[in-house]
Image (cartoon, rainbow, N blue to C red):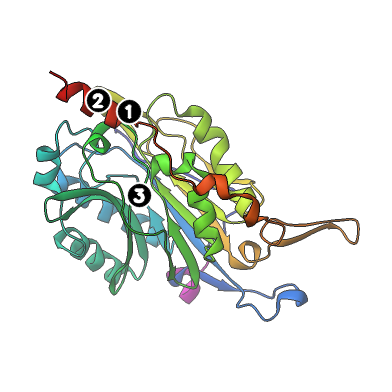
Amino acid sequence: MAGAMRRSGFGHKWETGEFRRSGLAEYDPHPEFCHLRASTMKIAGVQMDVALGDVDGNLSRITTLLRETADAGAALTIFPECAVTGYCFDSVEQSQELAQRIPGPVTDRVTAACATLQCHCIFGMLEADEERVFNAAVLIGPSGVIGSYRKVHLPYLGVDRHTTPGDRPFAVHEAGGVRIGMNICYDLAFPEAARCLALQGADLIALPTNWPPGAECMAANSIACRAMENGVYYAAVNRVGVEAGFSFIGRSRICAPDGTVLAAADSTDEEVLYADIDVTRSRRKHVVRVEDKHEIDRFADRRPEMYGTVTEPHSLATPRAVHAQTCSAP
């Protein structure tokens, strides 16, 4: 999109010197939490347009914008879902042409940028695994791939009509002292996904996404809800622009563990969001509002023995399965 990107973020710090480079800033925690390593990490979310099928051009934009956010002090920058390839492919054959292995040439190129800038990056791409294609997100640092995630919940939309459902458990990875979990787009609609990451100790859940019209309620409400109910930071980074007739709504958002909005893009323009991650907040699950009168712990107060219905297998036909049956009918 034309013009320079807007920058927004409410109350983020601009460190100087060594900490500006690393994105970490030491501070004195509340005495109750002196046993914790007190630090903050500045993160960035890049709401951007993506060119369908232009891997080289999209990677050039990612590395250029990564330099910009690193220069602004961000230790971790999050890009949208399928930021490397675009999203609206009409067949598995089209997506196979652009899918790459992890690690591979795409991750090697981003690793080189992270090594130069001494930062971390999360972005979406199509992952090739034999004949299968996964909608994936990758966490990369100066030394290479730290972790990757394959999208578990697939809507009947774009490339997700043809990709293979994620086949790996939800996992948390550490980067710069922050524990990071990844979901992708439609995963936000399933509270269990975020809860699995939070129970593994995630401080931050990153959600690269490609929300089209119809997802406005998710963008406005669900991010803060997932952050609040799990006591974690939640960063949802959407794309903008038009691709194969589909437009994307932007509205990226970063929320704090209490659901407070730290930074938001309420337009369909390209924009960079900044916020600080304070791990003592995300690791403090026991919340005291009025001592001895109002205290909650959404993890300790759980009753897993009562939730069996949630994990029971179901026999409902997904939209994808319905379409497959229709196509195969005589």
Q: Answer left or right for 194 relative to 318.
A: right
Span colored in magenta: 15-21
Label of residue 79 in the image = 3
**Amino acid at the residue labelled 1:** Pro
Q: Do the residues labelled 2 and 1 touch (CB within 8 Å)?
A: yes
Q: Answer left or right for 208 relative to 125.
A: right
Is 316 or 168 nearer to us in this picture?
316
Dot 2 falls on a residue whose secondary structure is helix
Q: Answer left or right for 52 relative to 221.
A: left
Label 1 to label 3, Cα distance in Å?
28 Å
Is 205 or 37 nearer to us in this picture?
205
Residue at image point 54% right, 45% down:
310
Q: Answer left or right for 230 relative to 155.
A: right
Label 3 to label 2, Cα distance in Å?
31 Å
| Image position, residue 146 (x, y; %) | 33, 69
Viewer-nearest of labels 3 and 2? Answer: 2
**Amino acid at the residue labelled 3:** Phe
Find residue 36 and report its image quarter: bottom right
Dot 3 falls on a residue whose secondary structure is loop
| Image position, residue 151 (x, y; %) | 34, 48
Is 205 or 70 nearer to us in this picture?
205
Label 2 to label 1, Cα distance in Å?
6 Å
**Amino acid at the residue labelled 2:** His
Residue at image point 56% right, 72% down:
25
Q: Mark 2 points at which residue?
A: 323
Q: Mark 1 points at which residue?
A: 319
Q: Are marks 3 and 2 in contact (CB under 8 Å)?
A: no
Q: Looking at the picture, does residue 35 appear above or below residue 294?
A: below
